[in-house]
Every structure is written in C-alpha cells, then in structure tokens.
Amino acid sequence: MPKELTALSAVQLRRLIGTGEISPVALLEACINRIRRYNPAVNAMAATCFARARQEAAEAERQVRAGEPLGPLHGIPLAVKDLEDTAGLLTTRGSPLLRTNVPDSDAASVARLRAAGAIVVGKTNVPEWGAGANSRNPVWGATGNPFAPLRNAGGSSGGSAAALACDMVPLATGSDTGGSLRIPAALCGVVGFRPSPGIVASERRALGWSPISVVGPMGRTVADTRLQLAAEAGVDAADPLTYPFATAALETREDVNLSELRVGYTEDFGICLVDQDIRETFRQTIAAIRPLVASCDELPDTTIAAMADADRCFDVIRAIGFVTGYHDIYQRDPALLGDNVRANYEIGAAMSLADVGWAHQQQTTIFRRFNELFHGVDVVLAPVTPVSRFPWSQLYAAEVDGQPTRNYYHWLGLTYVITLTTNPALSLPCGTDAAGMPFGLQIIGAHRADARLLDIAEEMERAFAKVPALRRPIPDRAALERPVPQLRALVSAPPPPELTRDDIE
C-alpha cells in the first residue's frame, strides 16, 4: 500500500474502509494535510468544514466497528463545487453578492452523496457565477493548473479538477453546460463525465426543462467516476428532467473487447477552432488507438454538415438561461455581474423569439443527425480543448490557431457541440501534448448509453495505462510545495473568517 492514503483510488479506499484496514478518520486527516500542503500552490479549495468533517469521520469509523450497514461512499472525503448549495457551509458561486451566503440545505445531488456516506470537506473554486472555463473570481481568486500553477486550470469545475489532480480528495463534484466538467478534467489530467440530462438532479437550473446544464462526477479514474455517479443519480421532484436510472448498470461493469469496438472520430466537427499542436496530438492519439479497435473512421460529411450552425445555435440556447437567471440583478445594476455573465446576458437580450424557435429546431436537427452515427459506431472520439494552456490572468482564449474567438466561450466549441446533442461524454486523460500539458480525449457515447460509455472508457483507460505516451500524467509534487500568491490577486474582500470555518492558507 502507498505511504499516502490520498494516492489510493476511491474504489480502493471504500473497500479498505469496509474491511477495517483503514480508518475514515485517518483518511480524512490525510486529505486535510494534503489540502494544507498543496492548496497554496493551486488555490483549488474555497470554504472548508474540517471540524464538521472530523465529527462525521469519527461517526463513520464507529459505524464500521459496530458492523452497521455502510453506504457505497462510506467515509470517502468529497469536495463540492462552489455552485452547489451545501448546508451550513459557505456557498458563494464566486460572486461578491454571495460572500456571506450559508445555505440551510444541500443541493439534491450533494444530499444523495452525503446519504451514501461521503464526507464533505469543503468547496472548490469556480468562475464568477460559473460562467467561463477559467476558474477565477473576486471572492477566492484564481485556481492554477497543477502542472503549471500560473496557467489556466479550466472551468467551471476547475477547483474540483485541480484538487483531484493534487490528490487532495478522492472525489469531487462538477457541472457542465458548455464543457465545464470535461475541459478542466482535460487540462488537469483527471476524469470528468457529463452524464445524460436527467440522471443527476439539478434544481439550480432556472429553466428546469432545458437539458444543456447537468451535474456530474469527477475522479482520477473512470471507476471512481462511475462510483460517484451511481451514488448521486436519482429522481427528484425539483428537477422535471430526472427519470429512474438503472444504477445497477454502473455498479457492475460489463466487459468490453476493444478489438470489436467501432470508433468514429473528428478533429473539429467541421466548425471548431483547434490549434495545430492539438490537432497533431490528437492525430498521434488516433494512430495509437487504431490498432486496438475494429475500425476507426472519420465522421461522415453528412454529420459534419449538420453541425454547420452549431455555434449560433449554442449562442441562443445558452443565452436564454442567462437572460432568465440574471434579469433582476442586471436590471438593478449590470456592474453587479462579472464580465462573462454580463456579456452573455446582453447577447441574449438582443435576441428575438424567432431566434429562440430557430435554435430549438436546429438543436433537434443536430441531435437526430448526430445520433444516426451510432448505428455504425460505438463511440465518437474528439479532442476536449482546442488549446494547450494559457495564463489564468487571461480571461479566456481570445485566439485559437491564429483566429480571434467571437466571445468568451467560443473556444469551447469542441465540447458545447456535444452539449447540444445531449449525448453522454467523458474526458479521459490521455498522455500529454506538445507543451507537456495533459491531453484530454473526449469519448462520446450513444443517446442515454451512459453505462456503456463508462464501460468502454474504463477499458480504454486500462489499455492506455500500458502505453507511456497515453497513460494519465501526474503533476510534479515537488513543484507544488511552493505557494503561488499571485493566484489570490483578484480577491477584493474575502468572506468573514467565521464563515470559511477553517484556515487552509
């Protein structure tokens, strides 16, 4: 067994807790020490609740010793993205307006994870209001990439991804509209899974019937990710999209023979801006995968043609949510919203009902045409991000492959195209790119075939682990021993100390 408990997977940890070989108390203390040791280098964690977590770990240990029934996540430390409500624990969403917001109850998904035995240790950093793929805000500052702390860790689940990459916690939550689970996972070298809409409840959506925003799991392995998904899946009366999901399919992995797998792939879906270095890394990855599978073919022209208006379609559908969710604040004072949220609101405010109708019709066409693919392929592969890295001080990638981006989220096209199709999609760590940063392979499954996608991804992960160029990269721990105070440069006025509950500086 490794000297550090934090190096073990969540699946291993849960098994060892169940047999009494490790203590939930010892595991929690190892995670707290890890947070205190490495968080100053990446600023992944926001508010924490170590005192409460210690009480819960002690109770979890008593239950093991007493032989009581144990949940699937019993005693596993968990970090929760700071967009999700947590009872008794500061939830700011990265906004100064919520600097003192302490909810009375947990979000539905958080409540399920806690009911399964997970122990919440704290919140993870996000962009202000979760808008954008750079986790920086005026409440907590910026999250740095564990492989290069002055570089972008992605977003909006950037704090969760960085915490996982540094082994601060075994599991963390995330959410995804345009790529917020997949992009930070790719940039930090962990797994991020965007499940089909309706598997995990998300009562935070102002437009409950819209499928573009989902809550989902993050982990260091596919098996850890599916363990968390099985615990948080379920119907909730506050989310009209939720439906009964057979979690048994997640709890027992079906064998996959890669030599029988039919793969489709694309570098750019015909419309996405992608740097040449990323294209080359993806081509090398496809070349390494091709001998492992039955077939590996580029997507047909008919599918690519259906994506032609995906950028505009996403503009409209994304903007509807921003106009709905932020109307009252914007009318009161636009300056109360961050740059990204304000820009998105103004994009939406200029649109017409005809634009909305066109976008929903177009999304339906994209969904139908894309899912026709799965009569002939099992999964589709694509890059996750179009660029390797840029400084966190740069709000977004203003240029990709020498071409300017239209707005702060245009560079996320590789992921938001799949948001429109609503297919389940996973970011799998797959070696490094030309800059030595983690490369994320986007694996996309058939409509609502979440369990099958996870089975395939887990088998690919197992195969990649045998190939040095494809296996998951690990950050340099020695480099993370040095604090990076620049990450706190954006903080205007921190929350009152009594609300953050613990000092992790």
Image (cartoon, grey):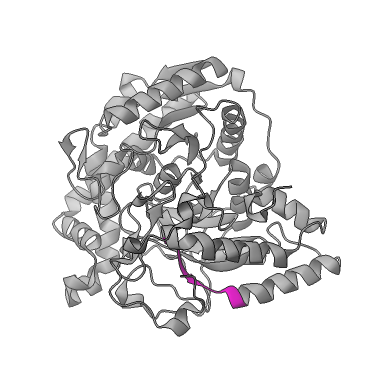
Return the x and y of residue 12 as percentages of the image width and height.
Answer: 71, 49
In magenta, the rendered stretch is 43-51
Q: Is residue 65 above or below residue 468?
A: below
Residue 8 visible somewhere in the drawing:
yes
Count of labels in the image: 0
Return the x and y of residue 138 as percentages of the image width and height.
Answer: 29, 69
Which residue is at a point 31% across and 38% down the rendered structure image?
Answer: 387
Residue 68 visible somewhere in the drawing:
no
In the rendered structure, the answer to whether residue 320 lies left or right of residue 187 reads left
Which residue is at a point 61% across and 77% down the rendered structure image?
Answer: 52
Q: Is residue 498 above or below residue 76?
A: below
Question: Residue 432 lies in what quarter of the image?
Answer: top left
In the rendered structure, the answer to whether residue 114 lies left or right of residue 425 reads right
In the rendered structure, the answer to whether residue 306 lies left or right of residue 12 reads left
Return the x and y of residue 363 as percentages of the image width and height.
Answer: 32, 41
Return the x and y of residue 370 as percentages of the image width and height.
Answer: 39, 31
Q: Is residue 161 above or below residue 422?
A: below
Which residue is at a point 58% across and 67% down the rendered structure image?
Answer: 120
Which residue is at a point 25% across and 50% down the rendered structure image?
Answer: 396
Residue lying at the far left in this picture: please name it: 350
Residue 45 within the segment the image draws in magenta: yes
Q: Is residue 162 above or below residue 128?
A: above
In the rendered structure, the answer to whether residue 208 lies left or right of residue 89 reads left
Residue 162 within the segment the image draws in magenta: no
390 vs 37, nearest the viewer: 37
